[in-house]
Image: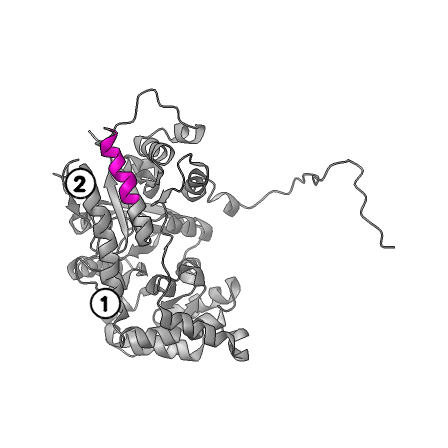
C-alpha cells in the first residue's frame, strides 16, 4: 500500500515561507485589469455590457480557422517551430511588408515571430533597456508598456499627448487632434534615454499619427540616438485617416526602429497569442536572443494558419471588410453616446473610445468600495457606478496616465467596442438608461 503524506496540523494549508520575491513581482500590483474583471463578475446587473476590455466577441474569419484545423493534422506543425518562426510565415511576412517598408525584408535576420505582440514588445524592450536607462512613454499610455519598461529595470519617462485647448464636455474631438508637443518630447530626451514607445494607431484615443508627426519623432530619435519601439497592432484598422509605418519613412529612421505586429489583432484571434517583430539585422539579433530565452519558439500550427491568412486576406478582401466592420461597431456606440449627450474622443483607428464623463452625476452619498476610495478620483467612481448600477463596464481614464499626470485622465473612461452585435445591442440598451435615469445632466 502506498504511503500517504501525513498532515499533522489538520489543515490543508501549506506553511508560509519567508522567501522574498524580486521587484518584478510587484510591478503589476496596482493594475486595473483584475479589478474590472472582478467588478464584471460581481455586478448585480447581469449580464454586464462588457466595454471595459478589448475582448473580441466575434470569431476570426473562416479561412484562417480552416487553415489552423488543417495544420493540426500535420505532425510537423505540432512540434517546435524554428526560434524565429516557420519559414513559410517569415517568407509571407516579408512578401507582405517589404513593399510597405520600401526594401526587401530579410527572412533570416529581420523578422522574428513571437508569442503575441505582448511578448514582441517585452522582448524588444528587454533586449535594449536596463537599469539606469529611461524609456519615453506617450500618455495616455497602455499600462503594459509601463510594466515592460519596469520589468527590464529601466525607468519610464512620460510625455503627454494633449487634447485641443478648446475641448469641452459637450464637444466631440478627434483623436488626431490630440497633439504631441515636440519641444516637450525633445526636452524629455537626455543621455539616459534608451528608447521611445510609439503606439500607432493609438490605444485609447484612436489617434493615427500623420507622416509629418512621425518624421519629426524619428528625426528627434536620430538626433538623440534613441531607439523606436513601435507597437502597430491596429495597423489594418485605421479608418479615419491613412496609416503610416514610421520605419517606412526613410532608412535612417528604419535603422533604429523595431515594429511589432499582432496576428491576433489582425484576424480577431487574440487567444492565438501570435505576433512578430520587424527590424534591421543589427537590432534584431538582440531581440532574437531575448526571444529565445523568454519563449524559445511560438506555437507552430498557429504560424502555419497565419501564413495562409496573411496570403489570403488581401486577395479575398478581408482587410477592407474588417476595417469597415470595426468602424461600424465604433459608430454604433458613438451614435448612442451622442444620443444621450456624452462627448467622446472620435477615433481614427482601433476599436476604443475615450468617453468624456464630466456630464455624469454620481449621487453624493453613493457608497464605494475601498479600492475605489483609495484612488478617489471621479473616473474610478463613475466606472464603478456604471458597472454596479447599470451593468456597463469601463476602464477609468487615469489608468492610462502616470500618478503625476493622472489628473489628465480623470475626465474620461475607456470603452472597448469590439463586441458582438448582441453585445453592442446590450450596451446601447444600458447606455440609454443613463439618460432615462437622469444621470446624464
Horizontal relation, residue 319 to residue 146: left or right: left
Residue drawn where x is 36% and y is 58% of the image:
58
Q: At which x and y percent is residue 23? A: 52, 45
Is residue 187 among the parts visible in the rendering? yes
The front one of 252 and 369 is: 369
Figure quadrant of the N terminus: bottom right
* Badge 1 element: helix
**Residue bounds of the magenta highlight:** 427-437
Which x, y percent locates residue 333?
24, 47
- Residue topped by disc 1: 320
Residue 75 lies left or right of residue 305; in this view the side is right
Q: Residue furthest right?
A: 1
User: Residue at 31% of width from left, 37% of height from top?
Assistant: 406
Q: Give the image quarter of residue 245.
A: bottom left
Q: Which of the 4 image quarters holds residue 62? A: bottom left
**Residue beneath the point at 42% across and 69% down:** 113
Q: Main secondary structure of the magenta part?
A: helix
Q: Residues within 10 Å of mark 2 (few under 14, many from 20)?
A: few
Locate the C terminus by quadrant.
top left
The residue that mark 2 highlights is 339
Residue drawn at the location 21% of the way across and 56% of the way down: 208
Toward the left, the furthest residue is 166
Amino acid at each position: 500500500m502506498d504511503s500517504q503524506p501525513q498532515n499533522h496540523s489538520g489543515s490543508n494549508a501549506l506553511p508560509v515561507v519567508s522567501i522574498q520575491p524580486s521587484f518584478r513581482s510587484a510591478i503589476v500590483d496596482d493594475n486595473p485589469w483584475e479589478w474590472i474583471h472582478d467588478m464584471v463578475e460581481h455586478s448585480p446587473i447581469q449580464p454586464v455590457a462588457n466595454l471595459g476590455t478589448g475582448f473580441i466577441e466575434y470569431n476570426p474569419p473562416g479561412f484562417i480557422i480552416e487553415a489552423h484545423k488543417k495544420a493540426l493534422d500535420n505532425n510537423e506543425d505540432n512540434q517546435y517551430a524554428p526560434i524565429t518562426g516557420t519559414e513559410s510565415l517569415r517568407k509571407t511576412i516579408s512578401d507582405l511588408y517589404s513593399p510597405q517598408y520600401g526594401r526587401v525584408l530579410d527572412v533570416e535576420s529581420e523578422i522574428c515571430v513571437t508569442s503575441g505582440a505582448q511578448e514582441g514588445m517585452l522582448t524588444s524592450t528587454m533586449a535594449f533597456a536596463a537599469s539606469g536607462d529611461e524609456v519615453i512613454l506617450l500618455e495616455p499610455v497602455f499600462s503594459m508598456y509601463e510594466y515592460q519598461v519596469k520589468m527590464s529595470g529601466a525607468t519610464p519617462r512620460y510625455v503627454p499627448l494633449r487634447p485641443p485647448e478648446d475641448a469641452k464636455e459637450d464637444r466631440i474631438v478627434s483623436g488626431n487632434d490630440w497633439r504631441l508637443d515636440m519641444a516637450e518630447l525633445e526636452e524629455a530626451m537626455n543621455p539616459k534615454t534608451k528608447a521611445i514607445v510609439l503606439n500607432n494607431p493609438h490605444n485609447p484615443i484612436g489617434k493615427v499619427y500623420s507622416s509629418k508627426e512621425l518624421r519629426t519623432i524619428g528625426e528627434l530619435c536620430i538626433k538623440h540616438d534613441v531607439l523606436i519601439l513601435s507597437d502597430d497592432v491596429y495597423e489594418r484598422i485605421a479608418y479615419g485617416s491613412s496609416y503610416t509605418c514610421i520605419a517606412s519613412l526613410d532608412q535612417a529612421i528604419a535603422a533604429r526602429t523595431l515594429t511589432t505586429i499582432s496576428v491576433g489583432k489582425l484576424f480577431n484571434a487574440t487567444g492565438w497569442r501570435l505576433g512578430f517583430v520587424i527590424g534591421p539585422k543589427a537590432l534584431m539579433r538582440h531581440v532574437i536572443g531575448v526571444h529565445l530565452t523568454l519563449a524559445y519558439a511560438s506555437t507552430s500550427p498557429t504560424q502555419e494558419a497565419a501564413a495562409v491568412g496573411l496570403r489570403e486576406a488581401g486577395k479575398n478582401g478581408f482587410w477592407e471588410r474588417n476595417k469597415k466592420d470595426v468602424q461600424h461597431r465604433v459608430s454604433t456606440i458613438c451614435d448612442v453616446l451622442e444620443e444621450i449627450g456624452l462627448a467622446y474622443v472620435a477615433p481614427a483607428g482601433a476599436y476604443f473610445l475615450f468617453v468624456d464623463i464630466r456630464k455624469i452625476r454620481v449621487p453624493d452619498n453613493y457608497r464605494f468600495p475601498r479600492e475605489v476610495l483609495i484612488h478617489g478620483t471621479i473616473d474610478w467612481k463613475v466606472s464603478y457606478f456604471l458597472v454596479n448600477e447599470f451593468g456597463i463596464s469601463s476602464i477609468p481614464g487615469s489608468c492610462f496616465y502616470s500618478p503625476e499626470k493622472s489628473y489628465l485622465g480623470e475626465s474620461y473612461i475607456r470603452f472597448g467596442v469590439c463586441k458582438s452585435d448582441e453585445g453592442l445591442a446590450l450596451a446601447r440598451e444600458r447606455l440609454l438608461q443613463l439618460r432615462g435615469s437622469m444621470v446624464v445632466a
